[in-house]
Image (cartoon, helix red, strand yellow):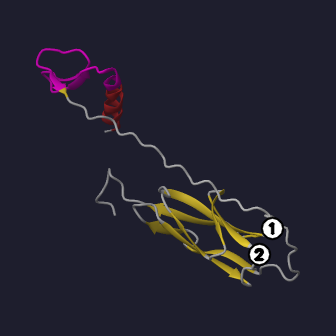
Amino acid sequence: MYRYLLLTLLLALPLALNAQIYRHVDADGNVSYSDRPQADAEEVELRAPSVYEAPRRPAPETSAPRGDDEESGPLYEELAIASPSHEGTVRDNEGNVNVRVAISPELRERHELELLLDGEPVARGQGLSFSLENVHRGEHQLRVRVRDSRGEVVAESDPSTFYMHQASRLFPQRQ
């Protein structure tokens, strides 16, 4: 089975050179492919290859430091990714993920949350919910940080892993 797949992939290479592919079955029933026509060979029509371009991640928003002095008081006792659950699976063919943050005590007025997906900042704000789009299938890690008015990190959550499931075009029956 894998040999046929490899053979098909190798035979698709000449397509870029506008070469023709011919399929031939010999007297013993063995099938062979070639770029040279043989007696009783039939021309194989190959579809154009699929090309995938990954969407670009949005640039993280930046905020200028406000220069305010922070109030004194206790730091955050709880900061975590509440949803999706740790080691949970998100099933969405469009790659949409709704993220909820749990924080205690409440977020201070001059503080802001920064959401990281796979170590890269993807969203900022004072709300406790974030909507991510175009998250590709596979394993991902979320983390949330609290930044003060100077942009310094004052608290950071433990990482939370989730798995993005999207139905495959190769196996559409596997939902």
Secondary structure of the residue carrying tag 1 is: loop
Badge 2, how many Cα within 10 Å: few under 14, some, many 20+? Answer: some
The quadrant in which the N terminus is found is top left
Q: Quadrant of residue 83?
A: bottom right
User: What's the residue at 35%, 25% (across, down)?
Assistant: 16
| Camera-side mark, 2 or 1 | 1
* Sequence-earlier tag: 2 or 1: 1
Q: Closer to the camera, 26 or 159?
A: 159
Task: Specify the label residue 66 is tagged with.
Answer: 1
Task: Specify the label residue 40 is tagged with.
Answer: none
User: What's the residue at 80%, 64% (across, down)?
Assistant: 65
Callout 2–callout 1 Cβ contact below 8 Å: yes
x, y (%) of residue 168? Answer: 36, 54
- Seen in the image, is 98 located left or right of residue 120? left
x, y (%) of residue 62? Answer: 70, 59
Residue 100 part of the magenta-drawn span: no
Q: Quadrant of residue 110?
A: bottom right
The residue type indicated by label 1 comes to Arg
Q: Closer to the camera, 51 or 57?
A: 57
x, y (%) of residue 99? Answer: 56, 71
Q: Which residue is mark 2?
A: 110
Q: Closer to the camera, 170 or 155?
A: 155
User: What's the residue at 34%, 64% (across, down)?
Assistant: 175
Give above or below for 105 relative to 70: below
- Seen in the image, is 132 located left or right of residue 147? left
Which region shows up in magenta? 14-43
The residue type indicated by label 2 comes to Arg
